[in-house]
Image (spheres, rainbow, N blue to C red):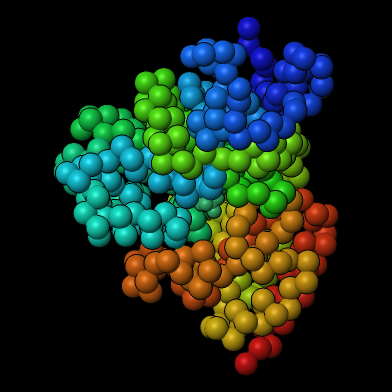
C-alpha cells in the first residue's frame, strides 16, 4: 500500500511503529548492544554500529522520499560522500564538477593525491568538456545541482544517460533542495547523497548524512562498508532528524515565500551587482530547474558592488542574519564562500569555479520576510557609503 504523497510520508515518519507500548512518536534506542535470544540466536539488531532501530526509521523514510531501495544514515554529510568513495579502486576515475561543495572538493583531491582513485574535475555545464571527460570511462560521476555557491543547474537526466553509455554510476548530492524538491533517482541517477545537517533536519542542531541507492544490491554493498568503516549515524541525531523532517513540507513553503520576497527586493537594490538564483527567468539554468525541480529553493548568492571593504561592512551591519556557514535551517544565515565554505579550494580553483571575493551566499530562513528584507536593506545601504 502506498503511504501517500511526499508531504504525508515526511510527516508520518516512524509514527505508530511501536508495537510494544503504542507510543505515537517512535522511541529513541540508545543501547549500544542488543541481547541474543540464546546461543547463536540473533535478534534483528545486535550492535548499534551495525544497526539501530531509530537510525533504521530515518534511513527508511529518506529512501522512501527519494524513491530508492536503501537508505544509509551516516554521522555527517562528508562521511556519506566518503562512503560512496569506497566503491572506487586505484584504477577507477571519479568525475566531479569544478564547483562542488568545498569540503567534498578537499576530500576528493586529497584522496586522489594519495592514489586511492583518479580524479577528473570538469565544468559540467560545458557539454564538450563533459563528453570528453566521459570518454575516459569514469566509474562514478558526481553531480551537484543547483551548485554551491553559484546555483548553477545541470541536466541530471542528460548526464545520467551519457554516463550510462560509458558504464558509469551517477551519484547526486541533493542537499540544496531536499527530497521534496528534487528526486534524482527518478531522473536516472543510481545514488543520492544528503547532508541531513541542512534542510532535512532543518534546525541546525545536528550534523548527519544519508546515502540512498536505487539498486538494493548496491545498497547492501554500501551498508556493509558503512558498518565496516564505522561511520553510521548516532541514534540521538537520527531521532532529532526524524523530528525535524516532519516539518520539512511547511518549512519549505515558508522558505520559498521568503526567498521570492527577498529576490524581488534585491533586484532593485543599487548595491547589488548580480544575483545567482535559478528562479530568475534570466538565470541560464532557469528552464532546466523548472523542469527537473519541484521548486527553486531558498539558497541564493549575489555579488555586491565594490570590494572587500563593502563585504566587511555588510557582515558588520547585519543583525537578523547570522554570519555562519551551513544552510537549510529555520534561521537566516549569510556567508562569504571564498573564506568560509570554499576555503578548502585554493584561490586559483575558486577563480576557475567563478567564486569572487564579493560573492555573498544567503540561506533564507523562515522568519518574517519583512524583517529579513529590512535587515539586508540597512546593511546593503551601508555598503554604498563604505570607503
Ligand atoms: C554541507 C554540505 C555537505 C557536507 O555535509 P556535512 O554534514 O557538513 O558533513 C556536502 N554537500 C553539500 C552540498 C553541503 O551543503
Q: Give left or right: position of 85 versus 30.
A: left
Q: Specify the quadrant that holds the N terminus.
A: top right
Judge by depth and name the residue closer to the eye, 63 or 318.
63
Judge by depth and name the residue closer to the eye, 180 or 69.
69
Where 214 sits versus 335, above or below? above
Please tell me in which quadrant of the rendered image residue 86 appears: top left
Judge by depth and name the residue closer to the eye, 31 or 76.
31
Name the residue at 40% across, 36% down.
Answer: 228
Q: Give left or right: position of 233 versus 102.
A: right
Q: Specify the quadrant that holds the C terminus.
A: bottom right
Name the residue at 32% across, 60% down.
Answer: 110
Residue at the limit of the structure toward the front, as seen here: 39
From the top left corner, tell me how far across and down residue 130 is, in percent. 26, 46
Residue at the limit of the structure toward the bottom, as seen here: 387
Name the residue at 45% across, 34% down.
Answer: 227
- Residue 36 visible (yes or no): yes
Q: Give left or right: position of 283 versus 225.
A: right
Please tell me in which quadrant of the rendered image residue 105 appears: bottom left
Judge by depth and name the residue closer to the eye, 66 or 374.
66
From the top left corner, tell me how far across and down residue 132 is, in percent. 19, 46
| Numbered circles on residues, count | 0
Where 120 sits versus 131, above or below? below
- Residue 286 visible (yes or no): no
Q: Give left or right: position of 227 versus 33.
A: left
From the top left corner, tell me how far across and down residue 134 is, in percent. 22, 42
Name the residue at 28% across, 46% down.
Answer: 94
From the top left corner, tell me how far across and down residue 66 is, in percent. 53, 28
Residue at the limit of the structure toward the top, as seen here: 1
Where 92 sits versus 42, above or below? below
Amino acid at each position: 500500500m502506498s503511504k501517500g504523497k511526499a508531504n504525508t510520508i515526511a510527516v508520518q515518519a516512524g509514527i505508530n511503529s511501536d508495537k510494544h507500548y503504542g507510543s505515537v512518536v517512535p522511541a529513541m534506542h540508545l543501547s549500544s548492544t542488543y541481547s541474543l535470544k540464546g546461543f547463536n540466536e540473533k535478534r534483528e539488531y545486535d550492535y548499534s554500529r551495525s544497526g539501530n532501530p531509530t537510525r533504521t526509521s530515518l534511513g527508511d523514510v529518506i529512501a522512501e522520499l527519494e524513491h530508492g531501495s536503501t537508505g544509509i544514515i551516516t554521522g555527517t554529510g562528508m562521511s556519506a560522500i566518503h562512503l560512496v568513495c569506497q566503491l572506487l579502486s586505484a584504477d577507477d576515475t571519479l568525475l566531479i564538477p569544478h564547483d562542488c561543495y568545498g569540503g567534498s572538493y578537499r576530500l576528493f583531491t586529497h584522496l586522489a593525491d594519495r592514489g586511492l582513485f583518479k580524479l577528473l574535475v570538469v565544468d559540467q555545464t560545458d557539454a564538450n568538456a563533459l563528453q570528453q571527460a566521459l570518454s575516459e570511462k569514469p566509474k562514478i560521476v558526481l553531480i551537484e545541482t543547483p551548485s554551491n555557491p553559484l546555483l548553477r543547474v545541470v541536466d541530471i537526466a542528460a548526464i545520467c544517460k551519457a554516463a550510462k553509455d560509458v558504464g558509469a554510476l551517477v551519484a547526486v548530492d541533493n542537499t540544496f533542495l531536499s527530497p521534496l524538491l528534487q528526486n534524482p533517482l527518478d531522473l536516472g541517477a543510481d545514488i543520492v547523497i544528503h547532508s541531513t545537517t541542512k534542510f532535512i533536519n532543518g534546525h541546525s542542531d545536528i550534523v548527519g548524512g544519508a546515502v540512498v541507492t536505487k539498486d538494493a544490491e548496491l545498497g547492501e554493498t554500501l551498508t556493509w562498508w558503512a558498518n565496516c568503516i564505522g561511520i553510521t549515524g548516532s541514534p540521538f541525531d537520527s531521532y532529532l532528524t526524524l523530528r525535524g523532517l516532519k516539518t520539512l513540507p511547511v518549512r519549505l513553503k515558508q522558505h520559498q515565500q521568503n526567498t521570492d520576497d527577498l529576490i524581488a527586493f534585491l533586484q532593485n537594490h543599487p548595491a547589488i551587482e548580480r544575483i545567482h538564483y535559478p528562479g530568475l527567468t534570466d538565470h541560464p539554468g532557469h528552464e532546466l530547474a523548472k523542469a527537473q525541480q519541484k521548486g527553486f529553493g531558498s539558497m541564493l548568492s549575489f555579488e555586491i558592488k565594490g570590494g572587500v571593504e563593502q563585504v566587511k561592512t555588510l557582515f558588520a551591519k547585519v543583525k537578523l542574519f547570522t554570519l555562519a556557514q551551513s544552510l537549510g535551517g529555520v534561521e537566516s544565515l549569510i556567508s562569504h564562500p571564498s573564506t568560509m565554505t570554499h576555503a578548502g579550494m585554493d584561490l586559483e580553483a575558486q577563480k576557475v569555479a567563478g567564486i569572487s571575493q564579493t560573492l555573498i551566499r544567503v540561506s533564507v530562513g523562515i522568519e518574517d520576510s519583512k524583517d529579513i528584507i529590512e535587515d539586508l536593506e540597512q546593511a546593503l545601504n551601508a555598503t554604498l557609503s563604505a570607503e
